[in-house]
Image (cartoon, rainbow, N blue to C red):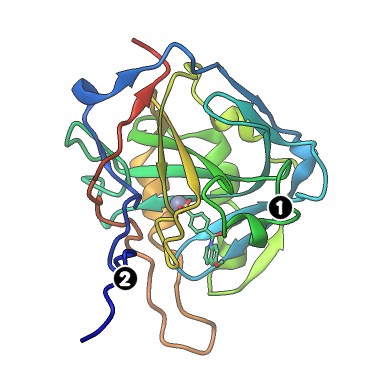
Amino acid sequence: MGVSTSRNEHCRPRQSPINIYTKKVRYDSSLRPLYIYYDPKSSRRLVNVGHCFNVEFEDNNDKSVVSDGPLTGYYRLRQLHFHWGSSDQDGSEHVIDGQTYPAELHIVHWNAQKYPSFDEAVKHPDGLAVIGVLLKIGEANPVIQNIINNLDKVKTKNKECPFTQLDVSSLLPNDRNYWTYQGSLTTPPYSECVTWIVLQEAILISSEQLFHFRGLLCTSESEKPTCILENHRPIQPLEARVVRSSSK
Ligand SMILES: COc1ccc2c(ccc[n+]2C(=O)c2ccc(S(N)(=O)=O)cc2)c1
Ligand SMILES: [Zn+2]
């Protein structure tokens, strides 16, 4: 008879994304306002990573960080990327009261106060902090247009190009109220290392700009071209978690 282990190998209690049911979130007065400082000189390059594109930042200093909010210590900006759908009807990863959005921005930071590197940080439950910003259809977003104007240089998988002077703060909504919960990466290896900070106000993107995202290729130059039509993970069980809110 096999020895039963207390750790159930199928138990993954803190997966992301989730549906945020706003009637069940808990206002937590101990949550502080987010401290966010991004230096436009931190942005380095635009990379096609196959399932999406990343804007990557220099993370060997503390020039671009997030702290306070639900966090202990400070987290360094590492990269940002988007998730989108094959139509404007869905594409976000987080869902709010069952409502999907056409896309979602993820701004990825790692706990540089506690860990020596990003790769080490992803092995720990408090390793990453990801700010999630929902996108809704409206007029064209000039900052996103700046990224789109460079997508043809990274059309195929693993291509990269220099990308500097991106002011990430200009991608954030004015209202910095947020929901927060303990979750995971939404792509393999789905590591349960992320403190999620989902902003309560959405930013705008135009339908045409989303169309350009879908033209990015997940194939390399030598392969038959295949577009990244969608790259959002389905919502996962909340399990024993409670989502906290910074606002009533
Ligand atoms: C230790 O092995 C890893 C760790 C992280 C990896 C990764 C492969 C792709 C992306 N990443 C990421 O950095 C990553 C993946 C997902 C997200 S997300 N969509 O913000 O949850 C953020 C960042 C492999
Ligand atoms: Zn993501």
What label does residue 243 carry, if any? none
- The kind of residue tagged 1 is Phe
Dot 2: element: loop
Residue 32: x and y, percent?
A: 54, 16
Dot 1: element: loop
Answer with mark 1 or mark 2, whichever residue precedes in sequence: 2
Quarter that holds the N terminus: bottom left
- The kind of residue tagged 2 is Thr
Residue contact at pointers 1 and 2, CB within 8 angstroms: no
Quarter that holds the C terminus: top left
Q: Residue at x 71, y 45 (%)?
A: 114
* Residue topped by disc 1: 163
Quarter occupied by residue 5? bottom left
In screen coordinates, is 24 left or right of 70?
left
In screen coordinates, is 119 left or right of 131?
right
Most extreme residue toward the right, as rendered?
61
Q: Residue at x 33, y 30 (%)?
A: 243
Q: Residue at x 35, y 49 (%)?
A: 14
Q: Residue at x 55, y 34 (%)?
A: 142
* Residue topped by disc 2: 5
From this view, report whether residue 244 is shown above or below residue 141: above
Mark 2 vs ligand 1: CB under 8 Å?
no
Mark 1 vs ligand 1: CB under 8 Å?
no
Crowding at label 2, few (<14), some or many (≥20) Cα neighbours within 10 Å? few
From this view, report whether residue 22 is shown above or below residue 190: above
Residue 210: x and y, percent?
A: 38, 48
In screen coordinates, is 137 left or right of 173?
left
Q: CA distance from mark 1 to mark 2?
A: 49 Å
